[in-house]
């Protein structure tokens, strides 16, 4: 959809180009079908705010429910069809305006637009002339079930999601601008949290301040449920209760990122509740920060994520030995899995339309995909030491620290998209 605005946008020409590139991947005489996301029930007769299926959005930029995209490829040429909700004044009174068939024809560069009521009829007719059927194998939807049943004995079936997710691995310049914009909002939110942590009394208050910044700046809201974990709660990796009191002398692990025009950010910072790191907290924090810096410096075209993971494990293990948290030779400790107790997760993940982007880590032959220019991934080493772990020196118990940045792979190396978000001890304390 063509738009003009001061903030980053993706033009309809890019969505059209994505559909054309995907059509080239289809086998001749194929029908490709993607459905919009279904509304999700919250309770009884209320629903969660609607969020479009990421693969569908990647190919269309269309945000409404009850829609479908169909691409039909013949021997060489292809045609595209968009199905949208029809205009209904009574329903629009309750749920808001719909784009409708006529408006969609003007805005989207597709060959035909139909109302959603015609999906079954039209697709059945097109399937009768096709040999191959592409659809998302993971989608459960009565609209798809009926069509799949009709096509079961006639066609070869392929997973449409696989093709789209592979295309999503490398971000376009427009996508990168949107991710950067999301990160700029997230920067403001994290800095606000650093400035206010001494004044607030609960994790929930801090979460509210962060998400206020997201909403104020036009973000959809959070790209995932914000983690605001103080003290020992930081040792629960996906802690989202955010209901504890903030206590003097404890650290607060804040893993929070906004989503802007469907593009995510994912940032973690760990800060002292009282504004000052203790000696032990600083020792552990700076060890992890140095590991993060080294792993980020390794990011470049051709590198494997598994190599980043292995190096991060080596460095973290060395750091824990130097602090007296682990004892022994790192090579043997790693072989025995001793580090996993304190570092149980990966060094990072793809990021884009989803915070954990739906893009493959291995190719069709099962071989790991190396980093390529235009990929965006997180780098997030961490150490988590439970308060009851008596095998660790007392001064380190109950400390959980993670530091996470969003990294763009460049032809000449990398760009840390979140470098402006404070993470040095002195920077955080000065806030």
Image (spheres, rainbow, N blue to C red):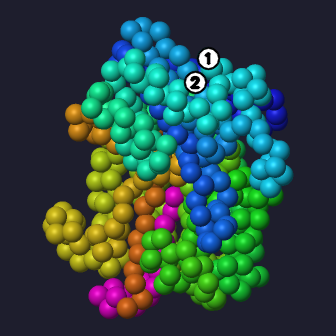
Instruction: Return the residue nearer the eye: 165 or 129.
Output: 129
User: Is 16 above or below relative to 373?
Assistant: above
Q: Is residue 413 visible?
A: no
Place of residue 414 in the rendered image (x, y in percent of width and height, measured from the top left): 50, 38
Contact flag, marks 2 and 1 (Cβ < 8 Å): yes
Q: Is 381 on the left or on the right of 306, as rendered?
A: right
Place of residue 218 in the rendered image (x, y in percent of width and height, measured from the top left): 77, 51
Q: CA distance from mark 2 to mark 1?
A: 6 Å
Q: Label 1 belongs to which residue?
A: 111
Q: Label 2 belongs to which residue?
A: 81
Numbered range of the magenta stretch: 389-410
Position of the N terminus, as image quadrant, is: top right
Position of the C terminus, as image quadrant, is: bottom right
Image point (67%, 79%), residue name: 204
Q: Secondary structure at mark 1?
A: loop
Q: Secondary structure at mark 2?
A: strand
- 393 inside magenta stretch: yes
User: Is 55 above or below relative to 389?
Assistant: above
Q: Residues within 10 Å of mark 2 (few under 14, many from 20)?
A: many
């Amino acid at each position: 959809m063509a738009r003009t605005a001061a903030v980053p946008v993706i033009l309809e020409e890019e969505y059209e180009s994505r559909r054309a590139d995907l059509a080239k991947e289809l086998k001749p005489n194929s029908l490709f079908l993607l459905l919009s996301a279904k509304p999700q029930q919250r309770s009884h007769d209320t629903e969660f705010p609607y969020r479009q299926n990421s693969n569908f959005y990647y190919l269309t930029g269309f945000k409404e429910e009850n829609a479908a995209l169909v691409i039909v490829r013949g021997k060489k040429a292809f045609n595209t069809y968009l199905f949208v909700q029809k205009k209904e004044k009574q329903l629009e009174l309750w749920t808001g305006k719909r784009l409708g068939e006529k408006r969609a024809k003007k805005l989207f560069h597709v060959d035909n637009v139909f109302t959603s009521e015609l999906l079954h009829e039209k697709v059945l007719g097109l399937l009768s002339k096709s040999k191959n059927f592409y659809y998302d194998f993971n989608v459960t939807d009565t609209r798809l079930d009926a069509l799949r049943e009709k096509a079961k004995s006639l066609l070869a079936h392929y997973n449409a999601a696989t093709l789209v997710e592979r295309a999503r691995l490398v971000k376009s310049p427009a996508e990168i601008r949107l991710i950067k914009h999301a990160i700029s909002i997230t920067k403001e939110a994290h800095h606000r949290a650093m400035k206010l942590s001494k004044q607030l009394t609960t994790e929930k208050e801090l979460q509210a301040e962060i998400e206020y910044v997201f909403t104020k700046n036009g973000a959809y809201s959070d790209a995932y449920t914000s983690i605001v974990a103080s003290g020992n709660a930081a040792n629960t990796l996906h802690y989202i209760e955010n209901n504890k009191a903030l206590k003097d002398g404890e650290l607060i692990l804040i893993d929070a990122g906004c989503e802007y025009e469907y593009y995510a950010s994912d940032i973690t910072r760990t800060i002292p509740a009282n504004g000052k790191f203790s000696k032990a907290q600083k020792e552990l924090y700076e060890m992890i920060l140095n590991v993060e810096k080294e792993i980020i410096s390794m990011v470049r075209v051709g590198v494997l994520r598994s190599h980043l993971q292995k190096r991060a494990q080596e460095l973290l293990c060395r750091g824990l030995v130097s602090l007296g948290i682990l004892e022994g030779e790192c090579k043997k400790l790693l072989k025995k899995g001793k580090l996993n107790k304190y570092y149980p997760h990966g060094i990072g993940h793809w990021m884009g339309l989803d915070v954990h982007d739906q893009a493959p880590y291995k190719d069709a032959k099962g071989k790991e995909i190396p980093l390529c220019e235009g990929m965006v991934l997180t780098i997030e080493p961490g150490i988590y030491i439970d308060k009851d772990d008596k095998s660790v020196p007392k001064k380190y118990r109950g400390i959980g620290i993670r530091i996470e940045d969003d990294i763009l792979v460049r032809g000449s190396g990398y760009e840390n998209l979140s470098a402006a978000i404070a993470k040095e001890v002195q920077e955080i304390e000065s806030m």
